[in-house]
Every structure is written in C-alpha cells, then in structure tokens.
Image: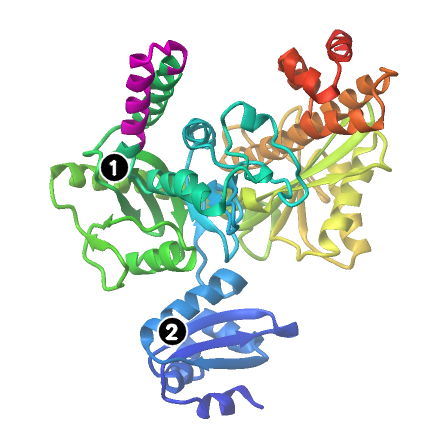
Amino acid sequence: MDLRRKVELAPKKPGVYIFYGEGREYLYIGKAKDLRRRLMTYFSDSSQRKNAKVQALTKEALELDYLVVSNEKEALLLEASLIFQHKPKYNVALKESEYYPYVEITKEDFPLVRIVRKRNLEGEYYGPYTNITLLRNLLDYLQQVYQFRTCERDLKRVKKPCTEYHLHRCLAPCSSKIDPETYVSSSIEPLRRFLRGEMQETFKLLEEKMKKHASLLDFENAAKYRDLLLNLQQLLENQGVVLEPWRNLDVVGNCGRCYVVLRVRGGNIVAKLNYSLDSTKIEDFLFHYYIVNRNELPEVVLTKKPVKLKLEAQVRPPADGTEAELLRKAIENAKVSAQKLELNIDALEQLKQLLKLQDVPRTIEGIDVAHLQGQLTVASLVVFRDGSPVKSLYRHYRLLNVVNDDPTAIREVVKRRYSKHPVPDLIFVDGGTGQVRAAIDGLREVGKDCGVVGLAKAEETICTVEGEMFLPKDHPVVRLLVAIRDEAHRFANTFHQKLRDKYLLESIIETIPMIGPKRRKKLLQKFSSLQQIKESPIEELTKLLGSERLAKLLVSKI
C-alpha cells in the first residue's frame, strides 16, 4: 500500500509509528497524540521543503506501521523501549563521549553482580560511572561486606564452593548452603541500597562489627572491619563530598548540544558524564537519558529551568547555594565540551577541503596493525564521531595467516570489516601510501568505495592515493589524525600484549612435564599472564594444582 494512503487511513488516536527501510530496517520511531495528524505532517509540502531529515526519511522509507495505545504516557514509554531496542537511523541519538561502565545485578534466583558496558532489556543496572578503577575498588570492598556472588559459573553444575567462600567474600549459593530469599535479603538488597546512595547503613554496619569484635578481644577481625570502613570512606571522599550524606541527585547542565551530568550519591560526586545530542532542548536529553537509555533515576534532578517532561523524580532548578554551585560546575564543564566539539568540527571541515571529500567526515574509522617480529599479527579498528572516540564500536581482528606484511594485513581487515558493515565517511590507516593503496584495494574487492587517508610517522606526513601533504604539526587536521593514530595504536598494542602474555604462559606451562591437560586448563582459566601467577600466593597455586611441589616448580620456571 502507498505510504501516503496508509497515513490517510491512520486512526486519530494516540500511538507509536515506525518507518521501515529496505529489509525492514528501522528508520524512525515516533509517538503522537493523534497518529493521523502527526503522520500527515511528514508528507506536507512545507515539511518537505524546510526539513532535510524529513525529506530523506520519506524518500528512503518503504513501509510504515503504527501501534495504537491507550494514552500519551503509554505511547511515550513504548517509543522509548523501541528506540532503546532498535536504535533507528533517523532518531536523535544520545552520544557518549566515553563508553561508561555500569553495575549489573542479574535476574536470577541467586543474582550475580558484575561490571558491564553493554546493557540489555532485562538486566538491573546502576550507574553509569566515570572511573572504572573506582567502581572495581568499590565493588571489591562491598563484596567483603555483603559477600555477594561475582563468579559466572553455572550453579547447577558446581558441587563445592570456590576460594571466594573460604575467603569470606561469597555466601556460596553454589553449594546449597543458603536459600535464595536469605541470599537476596542479606547480600543483594543492602548492595542495591548502597548503590542508590543510602550509604550510611553500610558505614554503620562496619562500625558496629568493628566495635563488637574489639569488645570480644578479636583484634584481627576488628582491624579488618576498621580497614574496610576507612578504605570505603576514603574512596568516596576522594570523589569530593558536596552535600549532606542523605542527598541523592543528578545535576544536568548543557551548552548547545553538549550535556554534562554530575551524579551525586550519598553526598559524593561518583561520576561526571559527557554526552552530545542533536538537540538543544533539555527535555529531549532527559527523555533519552532516563527513559530511552534507562539510566538510574534519583530523587532529584537539577536543571537550569523547569521542564515539561514528567519523570518519577523532582525535576527542578537549584533550591539553595550548594545546589546552584553544582549546576554552575555542570554548565561550565558542558561549555568546555562544546568548545572541544567546535574545534573538532572545524578540523573535520578542513579535512574535507584538503581531501576534496563530498561530505564532512563526521565518522572516521582508524586501522592499525601490531605483531611480534611478524608473529601473532593483530589489527585494531577504532571509531571516531565528530572528532571523539566511540569506544563501544571498537573492534579487534586476529590475522593468523599474515606474517610481517602491514599492507596485506590492512587489506585483509578492510575486506573483513566492510564486507559486513557500511563504510564510514573516511578510513584512516596508520602508515604511508602503501597502506593507503592496500585499504583501497580491499574496498574494491568487496565492491565498496570510501575516502582513505594515512599518516606516516616520521614527519607526520598526510598520505592519500594521490600523493603526500605536509602540514605544520600543530595544524588542527594533523592533531586530529595523530589522535586517531595514537588511539588505534594503543588499542592494537593492548590486545597484542594480552595475546603475547597468553602465548608465553602456554609455552612455559607446556615445558613442565607434570602439568597435564587438566591442570593446564585450570591454570589458563584462572590466569591470563605469567605476572599473575608470580604474584599469587603459593597456597592458592597449591590448591589449584593439588601439589605444593608442583606449585613451587611452576613459580621457579617463571
């Protein structure tokens, strides 16, 4: 059925509408109080003339569908859920300047607690956080207090508790020593309350345990709880105490389409988050941050002005001087982000002119190769949007059949990547004209076309298939390309180091005759490098291998 005809048949009721492209690709998802009236605007002459996005959407759309709901609120929630799940091409996207970590509590009888960067529809998440080291230390201390499960083993197949139980870091739900209700009430619920900002309960519990063991003259355990209490307090205080401990709020400041969120929990700033959005309306940001992305919603959200969007929290301007200072900090940080974005866009504009590209290269994918004297060859692919890295889209490639030949490796990566994925606005390769030509050859082999640029390290020479360009090292374009090159290089070397460590570990283990396949498997599952084995207590190695003599022999070989 013709799209315009389907629009004319749409009901005058609230609902959600979906434009589909080729292969039922989700192009755009929207909501409306009146479906027919809203959809008719897409085909009006004024919208087609004034809005390039509407023009492109209606030209590319092949199908249209809509879902009728009871009211506008239901339409809002359905729209958010579908956007979160399908991430349509033409919807405004909330872009993270970094790939932020979250705490996940899984939906199981005995929930698992872990740090993740990707979220699904079913998980229970707290965050995001800015500092991964802070988060790891925080969960480490809290596990010592509440003994929740962090291992990902199948509990149905485990017959006896692991080391974590004997170290009093886990209640061992794997061994039927505790029922699900008791585990959740004693381990998971207190953790949830702490992550929501109700931290005083944990501090009070540690203080009570410290005093109790001291009164029983059990000074060893008293010292353990004292150290836990001090470490936890110091960890949070280093983030900056700003409000009374019972105050939990988010502070949202923006400058243009750059937004900063300060997450305050228990009076401490636990994260400073940077985002960009193709909208300057604070309501659009709040919709995407809290409803679409399902981030944790505190009791209060501070904004410069009142907003119309209804959330299950107080959304209001600052009520006192302390809150006003927090908002000032958020706005100031947003201004810094906006200045950086403006500089990046300016560099991209200049890059377009230099390379004679049709469009500004807002999405650039960078490729680098790493190997050890031709062995263990790997490649990295990093993604930059508007001059900033998007770490969630980074990828690694293992190139087992390529030996000491960077151009061949680059051609192989380009073929593997772009035979399955669309090309970006520009491909960057670490190297000179030879690497650039190899990338172009790879594109031709998969029937794709894209601009390619390289950077030769000696003089930071910009290389294209047409020749070389020399610019001052402080030129914005050179600085941008160097940033992409350094990030691709770092990512490739980090992956290569892991492979080298694993390769050396396997090689050393294989030289010890008494370590057979079963023991070798246990070691490789537990450790990822020789350094980890070297730093492990001999008792732990003895328990893992079942022999103190063998454990000492292993350490002596390292």
In the image, 305: left or right of 105? left
Q: What amino acid type should be assigned to the residue bearing mark 2?
A: Ala
* Image coords of residue 428 (percent x, y): 65, 42
Q: Which corner quadrant holds the C terminus?
A: top right
Q: What amino acid type should be assigned to the residue bearing mark 1?
A: Lys
Front position in the image: 147 or 300: 147
* Image coords of residue 477 (percent x, y): 53, 38
Q: Residue at x 72, y 44 (%)?
A: 466
Span shown in magenta: 202-221
Residue 44 vertical position relative to residue 286 in the rendered view, above or below: below
Residue 459 vertical position relative to residue 41 in the rendered view, above or below: above
Membership of 80 in magenta stretch: no
Q: Secondary structure at mark 2?
A: helix
Q: Which corner quadrant holds the N terminus?
A: bottom right
Is residue 371 in view? Answer: yes
Q: What residue would you read off at disc 1?
A: 329
In the image, 111: left or right of 382? left
Q: CA distance from mark 2 to mark 1?
A: 35 Å
Q: Which mark is residue 75?
A: 2
Q: How many numbered discs?
A: 2
Q: Which mark is residue 508?
A: none
Q: Earlier in the sequence, mark 2 or mark 1?
A: 2
Mark 1, Cα crowd under 10 Å, few <14 / some 14-19 / many 20+, is some
Q: Secondary structure at mark 1?
A: helix
